[in-house]
Image (cartoon, coloured by chain):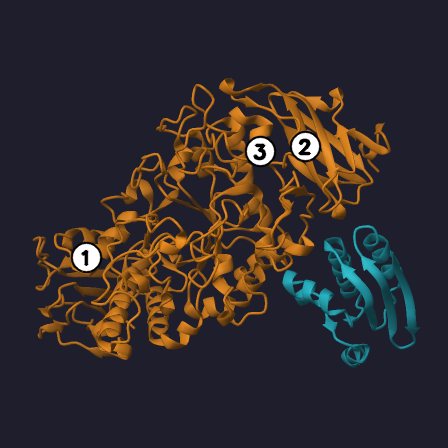
Chain colours: A orange, B cyan
Amino acid sequence: MRIDTNPTDTYGKYKIRPGIFLQNGSCLVPGGVNFSIYSSGAKSCELVLFRNHEKEPFAVIPFPPSYRIGNVFAMIVFDLDYENLEYGFYIDGAYDFARGDVYDHDKCLLDPYAKLLSGRNVWGEEPDWSNPFQYRSKVSLDDFDWEGDQPLKTPHNELIIYEAHVRGFTKDESSGVKYKGTYAGLREKIPYLKKLGITAIELLPIFEFDEFEGCRKNEEGTMLYNYWGYSTVAFFAPKAGYAASGRYSMQIDEFKNLVKELHKNNIKIILDVVFNHTAEGNENGPYISFKGIDNKTYYILTPDGYYYNFSGCGNTLNCNHSIVRNMILNCLRYWVAEYHVDGFRFDLAAILGRNQDGSPMSNPPLLEALAYDPLLSDAILIAEAWDAGGLYQVGSFPSYGRWAEWNGKYRDDIRKFLKGEPGLAGEVAARIAGSEDIYNPYWRGDCASINFITCHDGFTLWDLYAYNQKHNERNGWGGTDGGDEDHSWNCGFEGDCDQENVNFLRRKMIKNAAAILLTSIGTPMILAGDEFGNTQYGNNNPYCQDNQISWLDWSMLKKNEEIFTFFQKMIAFRKIHPVLQKMSQGVPAGYSMVSLHGMNSWEFDYSPENRVIGVMFAGKTNDGKDDFVYIGINAHWESHGIWLPQLPENCHWKIVVNTDLGNQAFYTKPVSLNPEQQFILGARSVIVCSTNF
Amino acid sequence: MLKVSVEQNDDIKIIALDGQLDVSTSEQAKEEVLSLFEVKPTIIFMEKCSYVSSSGLRSLLIMAKTAKAKGIKLVFAAPIAEVIDVFEMTGFIKMLTCVPTIEDAKQALR
C-alpha cells in the first residue's frame, strides 16, 4: 500500500489529491485517475468531467493553487467510473491577440495528450453540432496482451511498402470482409497482403481526425468529407471511426491487435503522421485544444499574432519549440512503445525543420532528437521533404544518416520517361541505380530513397495510363484542385475503354512501371490497388471522396488478375536478389555493382533522343553464387535491338520478364538467351533478365 | 450489476455470469470467478452477460490465463452476438476458447 494513493482533499463530493506532475494527460492510478496538463499562460485551470456523450458536465473541479508546479497542473480524482467518463479542461488566461494569447475560459478543451477520443466514434455519423465539446478525451487502458510481440527487426533494406487508406482499403462491398472499412477489416486482408508479398504497410493518417471537418456537398449532392484525414485532432489517439469497435471505445485494442497480427505475418506497419499543422485552422478556426491551452507555444505566429500557413491548412505547428518538440517526440515514442509501430512517414516534413520564426534551420533540434532517440533507433523515419511554404528539401533534408525520403524525382523521371519524353535516359538510369546523385550513400545510408511512381496523392497507376487530364469535377472546386503535372498518358483514349489494343497497352505500361519500380535500388512503395488496376476514374485528388471513387474495387482483382500476378512475381523476384536490396555480400570479380548500358552493352547513350536503356546489377545470391540482374527499357514507340552484357563463363542470361507478351509477361519458366544474338525489345516494353531464378 | 453463480459442479463446473461486465463489475467478477476455480473442466456460461467493456475483456483474459496456469480447461460458452462481435473486432477471440452453446462447451471439454 502506497501512502500517496490516499485522497488529501475533497471538492464537493469528489476526493482528490495533488497528482503526478511528470505524467502528461490522464492515466489510471490506484483508486483514481491522474490528470495533468501544461499551460504557460493559464491563470487557473479546471478539470471538466462528463458522462459519456452528455452535453453538460457532471463535475467541474478547479485545480487548487497547490496542485500546480511551474506551468503544470496535476490532480488525482478518486472513485471515477472511468469507462463512463469523458473529460476536458477550462483554462483561464489573457486574451491579447497580437501577443498570441487567446485564452477563452468558456471553451472546453481536449487534452493534447489524450490517448482515447470520443465524439466521432462511428465514421460518418453526424455529430450533434449544438454540443460545444465535440472532441472528448477519455481515459485509456494501455495494457494489452502482446504475446511476445515487438516491432519487427528485419532490415530496412527488405522493405516493400504498400500505401493504404484504412477505410478505403476494405469499405467497398467487393472487399468481402466482415468489418468493412476498419482496422479489423484490414486485419482480415492480411492473408492477401502476404500473398502479394509486401513487407510493410503504410497507413494514411490514423491519428484521430474529424471526417466532418470542412464537409460539404458537391453539385451532384454527394457529401464530401475530410476523407484522407491530413488534419490531426489528437496525436496520441487512434481514429475511433476506423475501428469496428469504435462505438464501444475499443479502438486501442482493435488497432493493437492489427499490429500484432501484421507482425505475426512479418509485415511492418508505418504510420503517415501529420505534425505540420492541426485541425484548429487559423484565427477563424475552432478551439479544440492547443489554441486555448497555449496558442503561442504550439503555433508559429506572425509578429502581430496571426498564424503562419506553411502547411496550406491554416496554421503551422511550432515544431522546434521545446514544448512542442517534446510532445512530438513523446508521441512517436508512445506509438513505438505502446503500439509497436515500426516507423513513420512525416507529411510535409520540411516544416519540422523550421525555426520559431518560420525560417529553415540547418540543424533542427527536433529532427536531430528524432534521429538519435533511443526508443526510435530501429524505427523507419520517412520524410516528405517539402512543405506548402516553398521549402523543398529532396536530397537535402537534415537526415543525420537516419531519415529516408519520398523520392519525388524518381516518380517524375520514371513517369516522363515511360510516357516517351526525351532527354531522360541518364536521369532514369540514375533513379534505377539508387539515386546516389541525390542521396549520397556515404551520408544517407543505403535506404534513403523511397521509390514510388504513384501514391495516394495523384493518379492511381491504372489512371496514369487511362487519362491525359485530371477529372476532379466531383471534388466541388470546378476541377481546379489537384496537381497538374501528372505526366500521364491515356494510351489513345481518355477514360474507360473497351478497345483491346488500348487496354493491352495500358496493362503493358503498368507492368513496365512495376518492373522498373521493383528492380530499382531503394525502397519500393506501391499504392494499394495498383496491383490490380484500381481506378479513381481520373480523379487525382480524391481527398474528400468517401465513396467508390476512393474505395478499392476488389472485383478488379479478378478482372486484372494478370496485373496482380505480375506484381506478385516481381516482388518475389526482388526478394531473391540481394543486390537489388543492397544486401549482397560481395560483387563478382571484374564487375561493378551497377553498370549502365544502351542498345550496345557497356555503351550508355546520354543523347536527348535516346529512349532505350539497360541497367545491370551484379552481386551474390544468399548462397554465395554470382548473381546478375539486367533490366532493359524501351520507352520508344518503335522496337529496338539490344545487346545484353557479356557474363563470366559460369553465368548465363535467362529472360524472366518481357512486358510485350501480355499475360505471359512474367515467364513461367525463364528462357535462356544467347548473348551472341541481338534481342529485339518491343515498343514501349521492359525486359528483366537474370542469371538466377 | 453482475451476478456470478455456480450452475453445476460435478465433473464439469459451470459458472454463469449474469449482467454487464464493465469497469464497475469486472474486478469483483474476476475475483469471484478465480475463487471458484478448482482443477476440473470449467465453463463460463455467458448467455446472460449483456455487455463486455474494455475492462471486462481484460477480466475474461485474466480468467483464461489463470485457468491455463492452474491446468484448468476453461471454455467460454454462449456469449451473445454483440459480445462475440467485440471479441472478434478486438482479437480477444483468439485468446479465449469460445463456443456457441453449453453443449458445445461440454463437447470441447470431453
Q: What residue type is labelled 1?
A: Phe
- Mark nearest the camera among 2 and 3 is 3
Image position of A375 (left or right of A62): left
Q: In this view, does A209 lie above or below B75?
A: above
Q: What residue type is labelled 3?
A: Tyr
Q: Which amino acid does label 2 sit on?
A: Phe
Q: Which mark is residue A276?
A: none
Judging depth in this view, the residue of B34 and A72 nearest the camera is A72
Element type where label 3 sits in the image: loop
Q: Name the residue under label 1.
A: A417
Residue B55: x and y, percent?
A: 75, 53
Q: Residue A287 carries which label?
A: 3
- Spatial CA distance of label 3 from label 1 is 48 Å
Say which residue appears at 38% left-offset and 61% top-offset. A536
Image position of A439 (left or right of A58): left
Residue A266: x and y, percent?
A: 49, 62
Q: Which of marks 1 and 3 precedes in the sequence?
A: 3
Q: In which quarter of the image is residue A288?
A: top right
- Mark nearest the camera among 3 and 1 is 3
